[in-house]
Amino acid sequence: MNCVIPQGYVPRLNVYETQRAIEFIKTSFQKNLGSALNLKRVSAPLFVEADSGLNDNLSGTERPVGFDVPAAGEGEFQVVQSLAKWKRWALKKYNFYPGKGLYTDMNAIRRDETVLDNLHSVYVDQWDWEKVILEEERTTDYLKDTVRRIVSAICMTADELEWEFPQTRSTLEREVTFITSQELEDLYPDLTPSERENVITREHHTVFLMQIGKTLRSGKPHDGRAPDYDDWELNGDILFYNPLLDRAFEISSMGIRVSPESLGRQLALSGCTQRRSLPYHRSLLAGELPYSIGGGIGQSRLCMLLLGCAHIGEVQCSVWDAETRRLCEAAGINLL
């Protein structure tokens, strides 16, 4: 059991009002995000063919949920773990051009989530987005500008929510602090990666932690990141400080996507060169897919942050261990 009950916690809204507020946040934020990044909504798959190479293998250890469809032949299908690769393929299929992109609702099941706690669930819902860029825009400056636009969309949504539900007032920091994972390790070499995130967000409140996935001087990466969607030199996580839980709160994983050159390099570093033969990877290595930037923004995470909730189960339906359910019920925390 990994659930933490903040002392004296009282939900800001009752169950009915929470449902109204969730609807308000989702409607407002996707409008603000679309305007900030010039994105249009598209439909997306719940599952893909297992041998297409389109599914995200996350850190490489999570098992996707697989199943067969007898009427569709002998192949296996997998529930998506994210749409990181599918979105880039969709940019080409739907004829998006530089400066424009897409967003969509992504729902996933991550059965190998190692910890179920206040922030982590087997059920994942997020806005997956992807945007076509020019090769010369594959820069740190372009990445930082995009991060600032996303943070502005989040803060604008928080303001709109407060107008509708005054008791939800939040104090998000609009100014983003940028730091690389190596710089963070150098500052706090004796702390674990998660402890470093907690310290830096306590100080700066809104942080973009860059270059996730590459090996640091300690011999380990800050965190695992699949080698075939983000460029490890041009990616990162948007972190907010959560005062209720007194910890870093990841709201988005994002980045400029791999080029044919960085894909080949990262596949080799990860020992995953066999993926070069998959349809998606062949197409990317051949230069047939557009350059892009993209990421995922947690829907339940955003609702939890803006509503001041103590547990993600207050804003989504999922499964929890018996002790978590008992503790939350005793504390007046309603798990949906």
Image: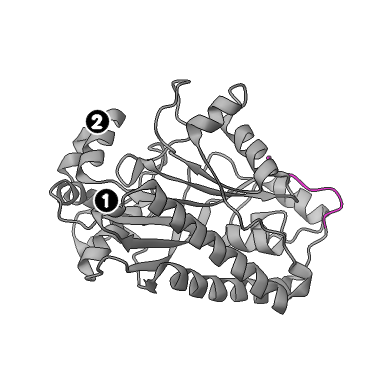
To which residue does mark 1 refer? 50
* 224 is higher (above) or lower (below) than 105: above
Sort mark 2 into few (<14), some (14-19) or many (20+) by Cα contacts within 10 Å. Answer: few
* 263 is higher (above) or lower (below) than 94: above
Residue type, mark 1 in image:
Ala
Q: Is residue 330 left or right of residue 109?
A: right
Q: How far is mark 1 from mark 2, CA to CA?
A: 22 Å
Residue 268, disc: 2
Residue drawn where x is 40% and y is 62% of the image: 129
Residue drawn where x is 62% and y is 21% of the image: 190
Residue type, mark 2 in image:
Ala
Q: Is residue 105 left or right of residue 19?
A: left
Q: Quadrant of the C terminus?
A: bottom right
Give percent across and percent down for residue 77.
29, 55
Q: Quadrant of the N terminus?
A: top right
Give percent across and percent down for residue 132.
29, 62
Q: Magenta segment range? A: 1-9
Q: Secondary structure at mark 2?
A: helix
Q: Secondary structure at mark 1?
A: helix
